[in-house]
């Protein structure tokens, strides 16, 4: 069976060629669009399984392309990985909040690009975990129904906000979440949370996780994610 089709949206031909080369070597089918409008056309013609989306593009920029794809029921399910240049972290935050799945920073390492591609496709094909089931991750067990977290089998005491925060990140290991996404997910009845307060809760959570504190990773300029040894590759 042939591998899924990945649409590469990139206006710089040499970068598009490079991405295409690495994906093709892994057996993916590829297609290239060199502008925002061309990308929207290609999505409706070719129905790609994944889109690698550059941010700075002629005509429509990558964020606008993302906004339009996520606004349409025909295309909202297609996963998007943004490909951003250095200094575009604020655009990355906007893109993630628009519904992009992840991002890769330029200049990218081929290993990182392929790892993120595999991870995003895998998670979109995998059935979601049933609601309320416990998550066991890197020695940390999170049980949403019992409101219990265990580190190496020993229960630790978390505040409600810390618990919700950890559960939210644990729902998708390896995927970065922005502070505002965390605020929206964690905020509950009687909980007021600013995006800056997220940092304070993360710091407290890390202290309580002790030598497992590194499972919560800081993504500079963007937000936080739960470490995932299967999909995160350090450069
Ligand atoms: Ca560009």
Image: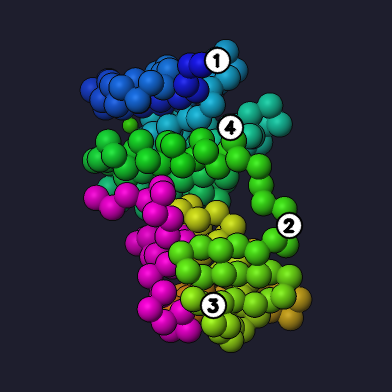
Helix, strand or loop under label 1: helix
Q: In this view, does 81 lie above or below 209?
A: above
Q: Estimate how packed mark 1 is, as few (under 14), some (14 to 19) or many (20 or more) residues with alpha carbons within 10 Å.
A: few
Helix, strand or loop under label 2: loop
In the image, is 120 to the left or to the right of 190?
Answer: left
* Residue at figure coordinates x 24%, y 50% from the top left: 235
Q: Mark 4 points at which residue?
A: 78
Q: Where is residue 152 drawn, in percent x and y? A: 49, 76
N-term mark: 2 or 3: 2
Q: Which portion, as a residue range, is magenta? A: 207-235
**Depth-wise, is mark 2 or mark 1 nearer the camera?**
2
**Depth-wise, is mark 1 or mark 3 nearer the camera?**
3
User: Is residue 90 in view from this perspective?
Assistant: no
Q: Estimate how packed mark 3 is, as few (under 14), some (14 to 19) or many (20 or more) residues with alpha carbons within 10 Å.
A: few
Q: Mark 2 points at which residue?
A: 131
Q: Name the residue under label 3.
A: 153
Q: Do the residues labelled 1 and 4 touch (CB within 8 Å)?
A: no
Q: Mark 1 points at which residue?
A: 46
Helix, strand or loop under label 4: loop
Q: Estimate how packed mark 4 is, as few (under 14), some (14 to 19) or many (20 or more) residues with alpha carbons within 10 Å.
A: some
Q: Are marks 2 and 3 in contact (CB under 8 Å)?
A: no
What is the spatial separation of the Cα atoms under label 2 and label 1, in whole angstroms?
Answer: 33 Å
- Image quarter of residue 83: top left
Quadrant of picture, ligand 1? top left
The question of residue 234 being in magenta is answered with: yes
Residue at the extreme bottom of the image, as rendered:
157
N-term mark: 2 or 1: 1
N-term mark: 2 or 4: 4
* Residue at figure coordinates x 27%, y 36% from the top left: 110
Q: Where is residue 57 drawn, in percent x and y? A: 38, 30
Q: Where is residue 107 drawn, in percent x and y? A: 24, 40
């Amino acid at each position: 069976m042939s591998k899924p089709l990945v649409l590469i949206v990139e206006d710089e031909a040499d970068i598009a060629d490079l991405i295409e080369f690495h994906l093709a070597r892994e057996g993916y089918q590829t297609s290239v669009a060199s502008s925002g409008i061309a990308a929207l056309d290609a999505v409706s013609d070719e129905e790609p399984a994944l889109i690698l989306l550059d941010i700075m593009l002629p005509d429509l920029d990558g964020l606008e392309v993302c906004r339009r794809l996520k606004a349409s029921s025909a295309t909202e399910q297609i996963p998007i990985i943004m490909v951003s240049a250095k200094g575009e972290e604020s655009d990355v935050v906007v893109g993630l909040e628009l519904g992009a799945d992840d991002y890769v920073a330029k200049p990218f390492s081929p290993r990182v690009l392929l790892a993120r591609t595999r991870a995003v496709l895998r998670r979109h094909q995998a059935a979601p975990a049933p609601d309320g089931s416990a998550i066991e991750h890197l020695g940390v067990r999170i049980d949403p129904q019992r409101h219990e977290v265990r580190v190496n089998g020993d229960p630790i005491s978390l505040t409600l906000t810390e618990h919700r925060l950890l559960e939210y990140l644990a729902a998708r290991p390896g995927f970065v979440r922005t502070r505002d996404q965390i605020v929206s997910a964690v905020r509950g009845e009687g909980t007021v949370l600013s995006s800056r307060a997220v940092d304070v809760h993360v710091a407290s959570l890390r202290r309580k996780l002790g030598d497992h504190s590194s499972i919560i990773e800081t993504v500079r300029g963007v937000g936080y994610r739960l470490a995932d040894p299967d999909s995160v590759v350090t450069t």
